[in-house]
Structures are given as C-alpha cells and as structure tokens.
Image: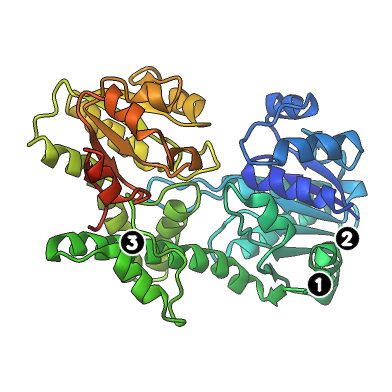
Amino acid sequence: MNIAIVGTGYVGLVSGTCFAEMGVNVTCIDVNEAKINSLLSGEIPIYEPGLDEMVLRNHREGRLNFSTDLTSVLDKVDIVFSAVGTPPDEDGSADLQYVLAVAKQFGQNIKKYTILVTKSTVPVGTAQKVKAVIQEELNKRRVDIPFDVASNPEFLKEGAAIKDFMSPDRVVVGVESEKAKEMMSKLYRPFLLNNFRVIFTDIPSAEMIKYAANSMLATRISFMNDIANLCELVGADVNMVRKGIGADSRIGNKFLYPGCGYGGSCFPKDVKALIKTAEKSGYSMRVLKSVEEVNEYQKTVVFQKLSKHYGGALKGKTIAIWGLAFKPETDDMREATSLVTIKLLQEANCRIRVYDPVAMNECQRRIGNSVEYASDMYDAVLNADALLLLTEWKQFRMPSWGVIKRSMSRPVIIDGRNIYDSQELKNLGFEYNCIGK
C-alpha cells in the first residue's frame, strides 16, 4: 500500500516511519523545504529514542521518502494522512488553518478515489469542515471524483512513541463508509496480527475520544496534585495515599503520581481546546477548568517551596535546575514547568544554572542565555544554594550525593517529582523537600 503523510512533526514523522517499518510505502510531505532537505540528508529534527536509526534504514531501503510536493504523489497513493499542527488560538481553541489547507490541496488535485485521514488532534466537527472544503474544490473543477474522509487520532507518548505505534493499546478510526473501513483495516492489520484492536466509530466520536482520553489523564494528574497539597497541610504522605487508592481495581495506579505539573504538546492544548469546544456548544466543562487551574498553580509549587525555605530572601542566590523538558526521554519544552520556574527565579533575581540530558539546545532556543548552561548534572550544582529537580530523567535517580553535598554552598534539595528517599537524604545532611509530604 502507498500512503502520504502531510506534516513531518512529531506525529507525522513517527507515524510515517513506523508504517514504513511494516512494509508500507510512505512519502512524508512538508512545506518546510529546509526540514525536508535535512531529512533527506539523514538529519532528524526531533528527539525520540530509536527514531534516527529507523528513519535512516527505511529511507535507505526505499520505503520512506520525503518531499515538499503533495500533488506529485497523489496519483500514486491510496491514503493521505493529515498530521499538520493545530496550535491553540489566543482563546484556546484549535487553529485549523493548516488542516483545511491540506483539505483544499487534496480537493484541487485528486484524480481517483483517495481517503484523507486526519491524524492531527482536532475538535469534534472538523471532519465535516474538511469534507466541505474538498467538495467545494471538486465542484470548482466540475469533476465527480469519489473520496472519503476519516479520523485516526494518535495516542503516542513522547519517549515511547515507537513502541506505542508498533504495539498499540488500541487504534481508533472514525469512518463514514465500508470502503474506508476496509482500507484502514488493511493498513493497520500488520500491527495487530495477534489482537486486532481497531475500534471503528463514527467520525465525531473518534474526534472526541482523543480529547476525552487526554483530558481524563490530565484530570488524574491534577487530582493527585490537589491531594498532595492537602496532604502537606494535614500531615499525610501522598505516596502512601497514592498506593492506597491505586490498589482499588476501579481506580488503578497509573497517572496517580504527584509532581510539579504537567506540560507538553498534548495535555495543556487538548484540555483548553475541549473547554473551548464546550463553550461554543453552550456548555461549561467545570471539571476541566479546575484541572487547568490546579495545573497552572502546581507549576509554581517548587518555587514557592524554595522561597519559603529562604524566607523570601532569594536575591543573589544560585539555584541549580535538573531537568528542562516537560518529561523524560524528549527535548520537548512546550508548557514545561521549567519555563515557569525559571521565570519566577529570574523575577526573584536569582542566578540560575540548568542541566538537561537532551533539552539544552531547545532551552537556549527558547530563552537564550538568560540562564547558565552547565556541562553536566554535577557542574550545575557547583556553589548552588539549592537544587530543584523538575524532570525525572533516569540519570538523576542515583547521583553521587557526597559529591553534590561538597559542591553546593548549602545542601538544599526540592524534589518536584518525588523520586528521592527523604530519610536517606536527611541522614546525609541534606535539607529536603518534596511534593505532598
């Protein structure tokens, strides 16, 4: 089968590469000529474990190609995936200009039956807008070419995206015709030989599933952060609470880890977009508004703990930060807690030294040289008055505490992800603070 994927961002590139890995002939399309030239020369624009080698191998073997011109491949493909960006507008709603631009180009150039599948996260009702744009272009051409639209939302976790795509929990596909259902089944069958976990739905339901899933996970995170903050006030230990409620089979133990807030490309954007979709329909998503409010507050908690520790006297203090990405195994800093923390530290006139295994270049791109970039995790804590742990990278889990204590001006640690043993650090002479304890 031959397919095209428009958009070589995180979703498009991972999806295209994984399809190629399973024998599909894939052309990834992007209007950014520099990005396509980089991919053609073997340079991968995003960080995702295992992706580099897979892209290079499939391109070398001819199954994965890159181009700036969708029209040049439309005659050869059966399915076109739209994986372009849907950034939030100023009011929080999803900006669909790129999605509709793909639909317009599709309608202007198809010559045979083809399916346009929306892979991007889009509000309910987008498929009908896409369908209308395609039909309008066909009417302008005065041709009657059959086509289908479909919705196939992605559920990829950054840092584990290849595994998620190759062995999915489920594949959700919204379709309007049996022919589209048959072709999408054929495309995904190699991934699900042992257990064909494709859930076929109507298109609006498929569009809603993505938003509902991410919003539920965000809700669990904010709920636990709210519980953690209360635990501190009443003398409970949130880690014990988490284990106690997670043992209930109706609740389960996933996404019950308290911390310093969620970020990334999906949860913040999707929660906002679902709230805005509801408002346009005359309904208020009261739970999700609170989820968003709790998360915005939680991103300030580490700074608040630091400020409280020093009685508000932070001017001139040297503060080390471990972790800049919104989560481990990615360089993505979109909506990252580190950005909020750095801004608060700058307003408090602190000297800031940061380290992250992969997100240093991304941080420099975002905020320039307004912070000091350490060469490694130990360099970051040199003469520091406090260490703030914001991202739970594996290499941060078992550091040499003796070296760190000797390097710091004052052995203060604020653990924003609750990865350290409080008693162990106190026994070693550290002043330790975490979330919810």
Q: Which mark is residue 194?
A: 1
245, above or below 269, in the image: below
The kind of residue tagged 3 is: Ser
Q: What x and y, as percent, mark residue 363?
A: 44, 28
Task: Residue 175: give x, y in percent of width and height.
Answer: 73, 71
In the rendered structure, the answer to whether residue 393 lies left or right of residue 320 reads: right
Position in image of residue 368 (x %, y %): 40, 20
Q: What residue sits 37% from the left and 70% below the top?
A: 243
Residue 79 or 221: which is nearer the viewer? 221
Callout in the foreground (1, 3): 1
Q: In this picture, is 224 found above or below 72?
A: below
330 vs 230: above or below: above
* Residue lying at 41% horizontally and 81% vertically, measured from the top left: 248
Q: Which residue is mark 2?
A: 113
In the picture, residue 303 is in which quadrant? Answer: top left
Position of 84 with respect to 301 (left or right) is: right
Of residues 313 and 333, the one nearer the viewer is: 313
The first of marks 2 and 3 along the sequence is 2
Image disc number at residue 31: none
Circles 1 and 2: CB distance less than 8 Å?
no
Q: Which is more foreground, mark 1 or mark 2?
A: 1
Query: Which residue type does callout 1 highlight?
Result: Asn
Pick whichever, 288 or 142, lies toward us.
288
Front in this rendered view, residue 229 or 369? 229
**Image position of 88 (left or right of 106):** left
**Numbered mark located on residue 222 in the image:** 3
Query: Residue type at mark 2?
Result: Tyr
Secondary structure under tag 3 reads: helix
> Can residue 86 be seen by looking at this rendering?
yes
Sequence-wise, the earlier of marks 1 and 2 is 2
Q: CA distance from mark 1 to mark 2?
A: 30 Å
